[in-house]
Image: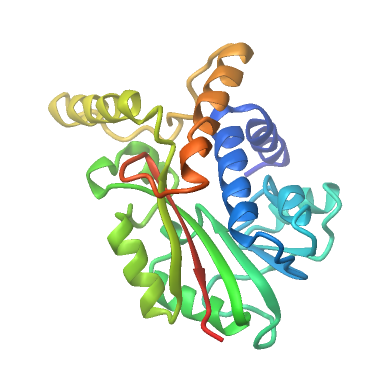
Amino acid sequence: MEAAAYRQFRELEENHWWFRGRRAVYLELLRHHLGAERPRAILDLGCGVGGFLEGLAALGGEVFPADLDRESLGLCRERGFPRGVVCDGYALPYRDASFDLVALFDAIEHIEDDARALTEVARVLRPGGHVVVSVPAYPLLFANNDRVARHQRRYTRRSLAAVLERAGFRTERNTHTNVLLFPLILPTVLCLKAVEVLARIPPDPERTNLTVPMPAFLHGLLARVFAAELAVSRHADWPAGHSILAIARKPA
């Protein structure tokens, strides 16, 4: 992508309701789960343009960005996180037990062999350390947006727990997210999929559910609705929703 495109994506991460809502929910659930624990070294793997870096740093430790894309890491440097590295999920350039927390926010669905990547994550985590993973939910909802984003798959809570366990983790939280808006999202995605199939519309790489224009006040309203699920999810796992968040621990 051109440099201007990366800056547009950074603006999208700051202002779009989905990015704002997931950031509020994921970081608060992680903070609540860790309690008094303060991870000293945090790896944000698949960090993109760095939307989660400041929130992860607020947990108390030093945050290391990592991504396949060098341009994205340049934007992370502008945010004040200069120690980014270019790498994939299969061969992390860190020693064993380097981190107390590894975050993969909407990352492993892009990786062909997710179990292999999570096994590598387990290697760089210290015993007793945590991994937090967010993914899109329900294979049935795989649509144009997933193809444009180059997703390999969507998950169920069971399939996400299974791949974490194969990598040696013990799952401690496994909840759906983007719950309150899911009754609107589900029929919309299914209708769009039906139209694409019946009308034989080829996938449009320029059109995703993030490109729909809407006024700023609506972004704010939808972000608040998204975040309202925290009243329940701080204490219990939701059984349905558009995404999934899991927090798992590497056994001591």
Tell me the quarter of the picture where residue 86 sits: bottom right
Q: Quadrant of the C terminus?
A: bottom right
Residue 113 seen in this snapshot = no
Q: What residue sits 39% from the left and 52% below the top?
A: 151
Question: Quick check: 170 above or below 216?
Answer: below
Question: Quick check: 222 above or below 111?
Answer: above
**Relative horizontal placement of residue 7, taking residue 182 as reference (left or right):** right
Q: What residue sits 55% from the left and 76% below the top?
A: 121
Q: Give the color scheme: rainbow, by chain, secondary structure or one colour.
A: rainbow
Camera-side residue of 246 and 66? 246
Q: In the rendering, at what x and y percent does residue 57 appear?
A: 78, 56
Residue at the far left: name it.
198
**Relative horizontal placement of residue 222, taking residue 109 as reference (left or right):** right
Camera-side residue of 211 and 59? 59
Residue 59 seen in this snapshot = yes
Q: What residue sits 25% from the left and 25% below the top?
A: 187
Question: Quick check: 125 above or below 71?
Answer: below
**Relative horizontal placement of residue 20, taking residue 208 as reference (left or right):** right
Q: Quadrant of the N terminus?
A: top right
Tell me the quarter of the picture where residue 63 sits: bottom right
Q: In the rendering, at what x and y percent does residue 180 appear?
A: 40, 29
Q: What residue sits 74% from the left and 65% below the top?
A: 38
Q: In the rendering, at what x and y percent does residue 178 appear?
A: 44, 36
Camera-side residue of 220 and 68? 220
Q: In the rendering, at what x and y percent does residue 222 appear?
A: 52, 22
